[in-house]
Amino acid sequence: MAMEITQQDSEKLLHRKLDLLLRTGKLLMESAADTSRIMRNMKRTAAYLGLPEEHLHIYINYNMLMVNLGDEEHSFSKFQRCEKHGINMTAISAISKLSWRAIREDYSLERYEEELENIRTRKRNYTPWQVAVGAGFACGGFCIQFGCDWPAFFYASIAAILGFRVRAVLNDLGSNHYVNIAAAAFVATLLAWASAFLSTAQWPGALGAVLHSDTPWHPLLACALFIVPGVPLINFVSDMLDNYVQVGITRAVNTLLIVVAMAFGIALAIRVCGIDNFVKDLSITPHHTYLEFAVAAAISAMGFSMIFNIPRRLLWVVAIGGIIAVCTRNFVNLGPSNNNIGLDWGPVIGSLVGSALISIIVTRLVHQFRTPHHCLSIPSVIPMIPGVLMYRALFAFIDMRGVVGEVTVAMNNAIQASLMILCIAIGVAIPNIFARRWITPKRRKQLKQMIEERRLRGKFVDLTNIG
């Protein structure tokens, strides 16, 4: 009887450990961690839980996680569904720290579970209105990068703030995710269209100097860019490079649906307002000083960081990263052909160089700031995501009327946007991969030593003790 009770208790303890492992992976997946990071953190957590790696099998899908612990005579499996996907860089960073700390300080299961639950239920770093304002100004920063003046920056920001709040309210009401995106894009574009009349009206005296804009239509290009799924796009490419093809394809399809919903909302607003196909004809080549580029990039990087729930202490770091990324991209991209200062190598090479430079810098800073690489590099490069080119391509396909050259315009925008996204993701990923290979042996040695110490203390699961 005593042996039977011991075996039952051992099996119950094993199921609890597998459950904790799955809950850790679920929180990472629902916080928009890339699959490689999820796998590394789950394996490190498994080492803390005493689950022998040689008998552990982890399966990661976008909506489902599975773990199996088994040998020739035993097999124990558990599944965990992932339902609410968002972006939470603070949670990703906290779980990474927790997995190391749990091993180093020999946490009890109760303490680990308590801290994991605290991470899951922790309030976000910014209130809903703070996030909306940050997202709005981020779109205004994009508008500056497309060549608008500063009055148009504020018009784009206000339209984006209100559009963002529309989506947030609809999400809280529980309506369809893609319908909410289309509604937000529709409202933001409608407000940006209305602002064009305000910016071109005859205002008396000083009021005219503040409200008049020489680029009244540019806000329509930038007001809905808070919807562009930059993190899923980068994670998609990163997953494909790391050979997690199934998860990568799922992220890509989800991203495409988001962009389609956004393009539909914008197209509907353009139809309602009776605007011609401005997204094909309006120039987005900027002619600002690099100081203005820097200010706009910092604003965009910090605004998107608030959407991603970056810790407040890192906002200034991300702002500097955004400045470096965008100014480097612009210097490589722009040049004499468009009356700018730069190398004139084009946006694709510019995106690659800007993102790679940021990734190299971040690999040297992650230990100083005690946060994962992607939590600094991705928010810094997000201002380079070619959102306008993406929905220009989709809008061109939606708005086809049989005119010669429409397919060429659509495909040109689609190919250029795809190449820029690919180069941004590769620029972020490649230096990080090499850095991991340089750092990993040291960390693996440290982890192996900790695991052996835990094994000697009897902390590892022995399947022979379970009937």
Image: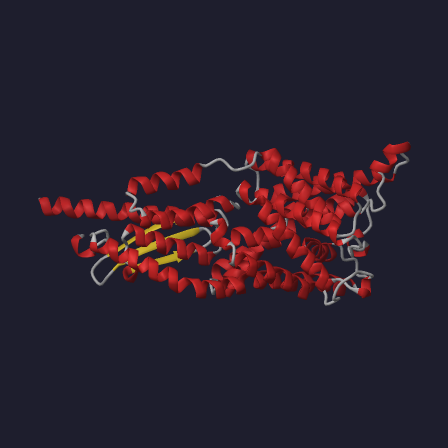
Count of marks overlaid on the render: 0
89 vs 350: above or below: above
Q: What residue occupies the far left of the structure in this picture?
A: 1
161 vs 25: above or below: above
Q: Nearer the viewer, residue 389 or 380?
A: 380
Q: Nearer the viewer, residue 4 or 140?
A: 140
The answer to whether 161 appears left or right of 28 in the picture is right
The answer to whether 367 appears left or right of 291 in the picture is left
Q: List x then y, in percent, for residue 311.
A: 52, 42
Residue at figure coordinates x 83%, y 47% from the top left: 215
Residue at figure coordinates x 72%, y 54% from the top left: 395
Q: List x then y, in percent, for residue 195.
A: 80, 38
Q: List x then y, in percent, for residue 46.
A: 32, 53
Image quadrant assignment for residue 182? top right
171 vs 380: above or below: above
Quarter containing the N terminus: top left
Q: Nearer the viewer, residue 401 or 99?
A: 99
Residue at figure coordinates x 74%, y 48% from the top left: 143
Q: List x then y, in percent, for residue 113.
A: 34, 41
Image quadrant assignment for residue 116? top left
Residue 90 in view: yes
Q: How is the image coloured?
A: secondary structure
Residue 254 in view: no
